[in-house]
Image: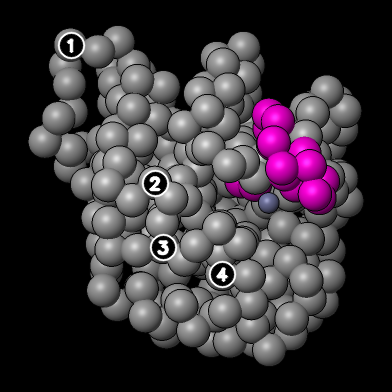
Amino acid sequence: MIIIDAHCHAGRGDRLTAPWNTAAPLGRYLRRARAAGIAKTVVIPAGHSDYSVANRELARIVARHRGRLIGFASVHSNRDAGRIRDMVRRAVVDWGFRGLKVHGYDAPATREVCEAVREFRIPMLLDVVGRAYLVDLLAPQFPDVNFIIPHIGSFMDDFRAQQQVVDQLVRHRNVFADTAGVRRFDFIVQAVRRAGPHKLIFGSDGPWLHPGLELHKIRLLGLPPEQEAMILGGNLMRLIGRVGTRSPHSPAQHSAPSRRATASQATR
Ligand SMILES: [Zn+2]
């Protein structure tokens, strides 16, 4: 069993108003993750005013750490409106990315964004920034899209949102949550008990949070090994293993898809 951190940032932001839009240097993170036994990491751009630039930088970083890093692109639902499909296509087909992050600080996910992730069969990491009701609007509209809600709904410890997301994990088959930065431990316990271990995904929110510390929270659940393994990588592999097969443009002429096809066959 390999451990995958499903939530880490990489690359530079350009706004410089908070750590998450300034810089996400990976050096220290990669040492800490290796020491903690984390074999692979999903990386997402830092906050940026132009995600086509940030995604391209991320692609270069992923290429430098092939086999260890898995790219998730970012889009801004409003600013990038009209070019979302193009951005997702480029990320998945040209760079081998396996998911899309939409941040509520930027703008909630629109129909255009949901349709693009559905076409390319990638999961959407959707930070609702406390507005958990968004999940109840989106999830039933796109039953064939898998939504991962980071921080069980709130990085800022909004317990109302986290409580609501635990309920949503129970109610919506296509809704998952990651554990990154969740401080109220009992929400993680509740999520496992009520929704099941197949609905939770380990993430650290590195490089700003320590991946070893975040991983220890999952160990502290004291789950049977097969359930712990689902949270530590099995669930994520299932969600990212569907990539590309629905795309009408699944191009046989590119070099990346053959690698992806192998990966998705391995997880079926
Ligand atoms: Zn994050």
Image quarter where the C terminus lies is top left
Per the rendering, the mark at residue 44 is: none
Q: Quadrant of residue 12?
A: top right
Please name the amino acid that badge 4 sits on. Val
What separation in Å lies between label 4 and label 3 (alpha carbons)?
Answer: 9 Å
Residue labelled with disc 4:
128
Please name the amino acid that badge 2 sits on. Asp
What separation in Å lies between label 2 and label 3 (alpha carbons)?
Answer: 11 Å
In the rendered structure, which disc, 4 or 1, sits on the residue that comes first in sequence? 4
Please name the amino acid that badge 1 sits on. Gln
Q: Which mark is in front, 4 or 1?
A: 4
Q: Vertically, is 251 above or below 89?
A: above
Residue labelled with disc 2:
80
Q: Quadrant of residue 137?
A: bottom left
Residue labelled with disc 3:
109
Q: Are marks 2 and 4 in contact (CB under 8 Å)?
A: no
Asked whether residue 85 is drawn in magenta, I would say no
Q: Residue at x 56, y 69 (%)?
A: 128
Per the rendering, the mark at residue 253 is: 1
Assess disc 3: are there few (<14), some (14-19) or many (≥20) residues with their C-alpha within 10 Å of its C-alpha. many
Assess disc 2: are there few (<14), some (14-19) or many (≥20) residues with their C-alpha within 10 Å of its C-alpha. some
In the rendered structure, which disc, 1 or 3, sits on the residue that comes first in sequence? 3
Q: Is residue 169 visible?
A: yes
Q: Position of residue 122 (x, y in %)?
A: 36, 46
What separation in Å lies between label 1 and label 2 (alpha carbons)?
Answer: 28 Å
* Nearer-the-camera pick, 99 or 169: 99
Q: Which residues are magenta?
A: 1-22
Image quarter where the N terminus lies is top right
Q: Are marks 1 and 2 in contact (CB under 8 Å)?
A: no
Please name the amino acid that badge 3 sits on. Ala
